[in-house]
Amino acid sequence: MTTESQVVLKKATLRYTYEEKSGIVVGSTTQRKVPVKVIYGVDKRTGVITAYQDNGKSDLSNTKPSDLTAIAQWGPRRGKIGDWTSLTSKTIPTSAPNDPTWDQLIANSYGDTTNEDVLNQTISKGVNDNLTEEERNLVKFPGVNQTSVDPNAPTADPPEEDPDTKPTPAASSEDEKGTVPDRVLVRSGNFGTWRYPKELPMNVSDLIQFTIIEYTTRVQTGQENTNRVQTPDALKVLAQSTGLKRAKADVKGTINLAIQPPVSDTNGVNWTDTGINLVQLGAAAGSLGFIQGGFGGASGILNQIAGGEAANTENVREALKVFFAQKASQASNLLSRLTGSVLNPNLETLFEGPRTRSFNYQFQFTPRDEKEATEVRSIIRTFKEAMAVKRTESLGFLKAPYVFNIKYLYNGEEDHPYIGRVKGPCALKDMQTDYTPEGSYMTYEGGENGGSMVKYTITLVFQELDPVYADDYVALGNENIIGY
């Protein structure tokens, strides 16, 4: 079981090169360089490498990964040993006039060297210097010294598949102890970062961002996030299940899309028409009297009702006789049929509770080249796979799918102030994919594997996991934004 103490955190210094107007000759520019520090973490038990935004502290001995902002992760992709996948669309803070995104930062070069080369060399040296031989064998990273190991040792490779299509998880050091938790069968790496249109400028466009995270209950707050079925501490169940926040979960992937209409939300609260008649009031009063004073209390309450002025009237007594006869005979509307009246239901609209909101989205994809077609297919695949129910190795349990944080981003950075926000994680309940939205089957001319569809349309239905409360608006602080 991986804990934060098993993650080695180190710093790396990169340089961001940008051009600045010189002011000497019209149109001339001067190249400037600014240092950019990032933190990288190497998980000694899984070999996963994550890049974090610098926290400004020189000493990382008391720093945990959960205290940092993850910005990228290294993982295998498309047959390569691996590459960096950005986990955020936000820019990396620097002293330059315009801050770069992660992709811009690692692609930035000075001379013949890119920041990605510098970072990779720093990480490989740090891994070789700080990890044991067994731990290094888990790290699939260029420049890391590895040796041949026992095939039953831990491995960071993706699970293999049996002929019956049941995935077999990679071996774990916990297997040697003879007690292996019921592991969940999911991909070993992240989903990556995708966007459409492919050239969508992240820092100037308004867009909708879907961030994929692990589903956590309120009871799981404070528990380690693992791909295993866990039983929470019984003593914490009651206290934490009534909490207002869910546990933070690692980002598993990000999808950035241009906003397409319709964009709407519907807020609602559950109210219902409820009545209570004279007989029900009497029964409720008797029950309350029994709870408060036993048989004596119940008897006293019923005597007061029976001795009341209304109960002594002949009309009320006769009406009650007919009412009870109706109940005994199971006849309907007997009182109204015989007397032309009914017991006063004292009808009132009463509050029942909050309601979670649903969000419907429809996106049309028309890829213009093979790269964009690949991006579109990856987006559709990511939505489908993330919403799929997970099975455990024993097939005895099913685990909840991944959930999504949904944000409307203003200029690709902050929450859009003029569109209602989506609160917290949402479950993707339904997804419909239309491969022939124009009513005819059309594909682009392709190679050996055929061509992509000319157009795709997906319809997504999300449901918020938590309702919106009045204090959520108070917490926003700014009364000029729409809120939720």
Image (cartoon, rainbow, N blue to C red):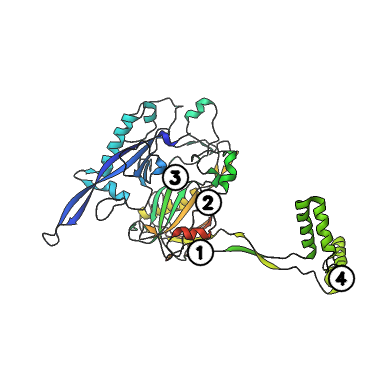
| Mark toward the start of the polypeptide (4 vs 2) | 2
* Kind of residue indicated by mark 3: Asp
Residue 382 in the image: x percent, y percent?
45, 50
Residue 356 in the image: x percent, y percent?
56, 58
Select label 2 or label 1 by which is in front: 2
Q: Which mark is residue 213?
A: none
375 to the left or right of 180:
left
Q: Which mark is residue 250?
A: 3
| Mark toward the start of the polypeptide (2 vs 1) | 2
| Mark toward the start of the polypeptide (3 vs 2) | 2
Disc 4 and disc 1 in contact, CB within 8 angstroms: no
23 to the left or right of 40:
left
| Mark toward the start of the polypeptide (3 vs 4) | 3
| Nearest to the observer: residue 292 or residue 27 | 292
Badge 4 local density, few (<14 within 10 Å), some, or many (20+)?
Answer: few
* Kind of residue indicated by mark 4: Thr
Query: Is 157 drawn above or below residue 206 in the view shown?
Result: above
Residue denoted by label 1: 265
Disc 1 and disc 3 in contact, CB within 8 angstroms: no
410 to the left or right of 242:
left
Residue denoted by label 4: 313
Q: Give the residue at x 44% y 59%.
A: 476
| Mark toward the start of the polypeptide (4 vs 1) | 1
Q: Which mark is residue 244?
A: 2
Residue furthest out toward the bottom: 340
Q: Is residue 459 visible?
A: no
| Mark toward the start of the polypeptide (1 vs 3) | 3
Badge 2 local density, few (<14 within 10 Å), some, or many (20+)?
Answer: few
* Kind of residue indicated by mark 1: Asp
Q: CA distance from mark 2 to mark 1?
A: 22 Å
Residue 275 in the image: x percent, y percent?
72, 65
